[in-house]
């Protein structure tokens, strides 16, 4: 019996990739939260106990598995990006999305929002480079298409 959500065999590959990305993303972000909690526990409670070495060893072993999961998540995300998002857009649409992500990144007040949009701008910039283009000088729209 499988632990993954059931999908009809006829499901489109894009749908399967999106579902896989959602599962991996959930696992990754849950693992990150658990890691933050474990670090806090280690700092606050275990620093002066005899079990600290045992905890640190297990924590280190689990960290390498989390990194492997993150690499898989990134690889699947790249496939979804290339096959489903960027590939269907015109050059002008990619230029606009790059400009929107850049503008949102530069002008937003929230740290996490800035980081998300900086990453999006890099992705849109990489798509432009794949197409042999450089970003034009257009002004983007805050929270426009292509930003987060």
Image (tube, helix red, strand yellow):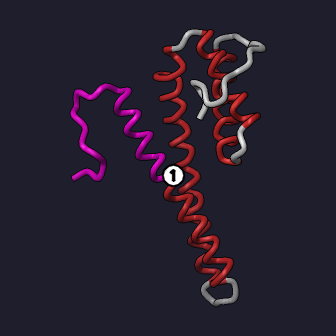
Question: Looking at the image, which residue is at 63% across and 70% down?
Answer: 39
Name the quarter where the C terminus is drawn: top right
Residue 101 is covered by the magenta coloring: no
Query: Disc 1 designates what residue?
Result: 28
In the rendered image of this protein, does residue 70 appear above or below residue 31?
Answer: above
Drawn side of residue 90 relative to residue 8, left or right: right
Q: For residue 129, which quarter of the picture?
A: top right
Instruction: State the residue in front, 38 or 65.
Output: 38
75, above or below 132, in the image: below
**Residue ID at (64%, 73%):** 40
Left or right placement of residue 1 versus residue 118 in this view: left
Q: Is residue 26 magenta?
A: yes
Image position of 116 with respect to 138: above or below: below
User: Judging from the image, what secondary structure is the residue with disc 1 in?
Assistant: helix
Where is residue 94, by image quadrant? top right
Residue 135 x %, y %? 74, 16
Kindly indicate the quadrant of the structure image that contains residue 18. Answer: top left
Q: Is residue 44 above or below residue 114?
A: below
Residue nearest the observer in this picture, 62 or 144: 144
Return the x and y of residue 91 as percentages of the image width and height: 61, 10
Left or right, 147 with reference to 140: left
Question: How many marks can you see?
Answer: 1
Q: Whole-percent x and y of residue 146?
A: 59, 26
Kindly identify the residue that appears in the image at 71 percent across and 35 percent down: 105
Q: Position of residue 36 (x, y in %)?
A: 60, 65
Q: Residue placed at 51% from the left, 52% from the top?
A: 28
Q: Is residue 128 left or right of residue 21?
A: right
Chain part drawn in magenta: 1-28
Mark 1: few/some/many CA within 10 Å (<14, 14-19, 20+): many
């Amino acid at each position: 019996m499988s632990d993954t959500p059931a999908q009809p065999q006829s499901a489109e590959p894009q749908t399967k990739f999106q579902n896989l990305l959602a599962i991996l993303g959930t696992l990754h972000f849950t693992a990150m939260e658990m890691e933050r909690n474990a670090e806090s526990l280690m700092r606050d409670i275990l620093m002066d106990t005899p079990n600290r070495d045992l905890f640190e060893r297990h924590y280190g072993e689990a960290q390498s598995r989390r990194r492997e999961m993150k690499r898989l998540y990134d690889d699947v995300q790249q496939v979804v990006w290339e096959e489903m998002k960027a590939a269907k857009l015109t050059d002008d649409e990619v230029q606009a999305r790059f400009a929107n992500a850049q503008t949102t990144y530069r002008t937003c007040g929230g740290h996490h929002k800035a980081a998300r949009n900086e990453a999006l701008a890099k992705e849109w910039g990489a798509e432009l480079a794949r197409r042999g283009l450089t970003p034009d000088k257009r002004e983007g729209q805050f929270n426009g298409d292509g930003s987060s």
